Amino acid sequence: MKFNDLYEELFYKALSIRLVEEKIIELYPTDKIESPVHLSIGQEAVAVGVCQELRTTDLIFSNNRGHAYYLAKGGDLKEFFAELYGKNTGCCRGKGGSMHLAATDVGFMGASAIVASTIPHAVGAALAAKKLNKNHIITSVFGDGAVDEGVYHEALNFASLHKLPIIFVCENNDLAVHSRTTERQAFKILDHAGNYGIPTHYCAEGYDFTEVYRVFSRLVSEVRTTRLPQYIEIKTCRYMEHVGVNEDYNAGYRSIKQIESWKAKDPLMNQKALIDKFKPSILKEIEEAVMFAEDSSWPELTDLLTDVI
Amino acid sequence: MNSLIDKFSGSVLSYREALFHAMDDALSGNPKVIIMGQGVTDHKGLFGTTLNFSSKYGRDRVLDTPLAEEALAGIALGASLNGLYPINTHMRVDFSLCCMNQVVNLIAKYKYMSGGQFECPMLIRMVIGRSWGQGAQHSQSLQSFFAHVPGLTVIMPSHSDSILKDYHYIVHSYRAPVISIEHRLLYDVKFNIEQNSVYSNDDPLSSHLVRNGNDVTIVATSIMVLEALRAAQYLSTNAGLECEVIDLNCVSHPDKEMIMNSVEKTGRLIIADTSWQAYGVCAEVCRIVCEKAPSLLKVPVLTLGMQPATCPTAKTLEDYFYPNLQTLTGAIARIVSGKTNHGIPLPDEHSMADAYKKFRGPF
């Protein structure tokens, strides 16, 4: 795909993720994806803006809402759908599924369904990068829910203490499942992170991939040079229910007005010309990936006990 | 051939010294090895097993850590994924409960749930405390917690040979996470290092047949192996009974064939573990025999371990809490004779810890 400029490229990547997630919504009632799905719809721009400046050799650690990061980091789309289908051609040969995607070839280092649990992995990878004199950098992505966990604080302290080449990215959608940050946190995320001696940054425009890219690429350059940790909180918005393929605005834990004001600024909903320009080729790619998943075979009994040790 | 066994063959090494040399071998033999743990750089050096390594190898490779067990286990995993070989230490097994999330949910599963894309070789060392008032939270022996979970390899070395051989193999050749549960009371016990002992000849990460006998099979772990050998020696001398003793060593992957062959020969089985009997090594060894050939047993199995209570601090209570030479020899005499009133004189020893008096605290 040829792009006129960086904006088009970022738009294309973000739209691809949106359309992949919408394909999952379409497929879900068929029960071909027999697992929970935590959709990234509304948060695509953050993943795209973050991953744009990262190299294949840079490592990223994600979480169970990880579709967007897998794809934005360059994870294979065919292997993605095959993994969701539980096929043996999936990126994790059907053993990980939606919540545990991994693609070592592009530095997507796995995703965990235990909130905050991959943050120390990113710190450990950064420790290895430092000790082994590697020149790549590490990115740790987590939500505002992870900030509640003790291990988050342990990990930030260690990264700062040991001066590690890592960027912490807090995607703040204000929700841990259905609980708002005001019900969970007695502190301000950035004030607190800053107290660990890590420079902090804020991006309020998480719907705008160019703004995320602009801010984040600066941090990437900074960490490449200084090899010291950075922290950024990026405001974002989860359009769908916590897990599953539906909206749940009638559940009462948040108002649809908040979402509507966010959607009004969402380029993936408003830039009709670019959507029309790119949608056909993206859909074609998605159809091919779904067909690949459909045509692939299931893992067998002989696969059950491989890779245990 | 194992270079560490070769190097120390013919000498006498305490468990502590073997650990020291195994750590030295790990750091000197592989520049990607790092040791991370509370106190590993201090003047005590994790009970002497990492003493002065921060000077010898640098604080870059031997890291004192914050009191952050969960993060440290996760950092070990991330470091392993990116090319280091981490050795993470816990002065007590009990402290590792703070990192169970990482060990069980992540470290054990990272390879499997990525479809084999990742490997996370690492060694996690934990020390069981006993005696001198270790009490409720410095004494637990939680091997069954870890061995229960697929993806973890769990060993309980009972001999300096085991440490030299297993650790060398684990650190330099084994591509998966290993949990080694060491016993604090063994630290000052001295062992002869021999080129052709059962420890040096058998596969690493396996079980060892450490004594031959026809009357009863004793499957034991960690310090209970030494206790079983003491009991076997006593009964051989005083009653003419011959016990066969198996050092389980790798509790997550025991040599089932060795156990079955022995039970076939003796028809009697005692399991002596350092922990509680329920849902643990005692139960697991029973499962192995019951599933394979329960009819080999002439009499019901007998198990020894800690009493089903929290470990008490007072020495009088602690002495009741653990099995000792008298309870162990009594059990063997009962199972072999088939009688409670067997008439075999039992040794007058009520505190096993007294036999390992070198451990005088504080911890």
Image: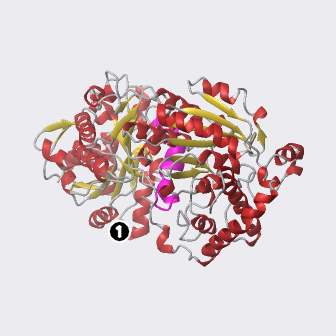
- Category of crowding for the residue at label 1, using alpha-carbon neighbours closer than 10 angstroms: few (below 14), some (14–19), many (at least 20): some
Report the residue that reaches farthest toward the left: B10
Horizontal and vertical percent position of residue B257: 31, 65
How many marks on residues? 1
The quadrant in which the C terminus of chain A is found is bottom left
Horizontal and vertical percent position of residue A48: 64, 50
Work out whether residue A42 can be spotted.
Answer: yes
- Judge left or right: residue A238 versus residue B241: right
| A144 or A220: nearer the viewer | A220
Helix, strand or loop: magenta stretch: helix
Q: Write down the chain letter for disc 1.
A: B
Q: Quadrant of residue A207?
A: top right
Horizontal and vertical percent position of residue A263: 83, 48
Element carrying mark 1: helix
| B195 or B36: nearer the viewer | B36
| B54 or A295: nearer the viewer | A295
- Judge left or right: residue A238 versus residue B163: right
Q: Tell me: residue A76, above or below residue B33.
A: below
What type is the residue that disc 1 sits on?
Leu
Residue located at (86% from left, 44% from top): A261
Q: Quadrant of residue A37?
A: bottom right
- Judge left or right: residue B73 versus residue A96: left
The magenta segment? B94-117
Horizontal and vertical percent position of residue A68: 65, 54
| A120 or A67: nearer the viewer | A67
Q: Tell me: residue B73, above or below residue A298.
A: above
Instruction: Please say whether residue B38 is one of the residues in the magenta stretch.
Output: no
Residue indicated by mark 1: B296
Residue located at (13% from left, 47% from top): B6
The quadrant in which the N terminus of chain A is found is bottom right
Work out whether residue B310 can be spotted.
Answer: no
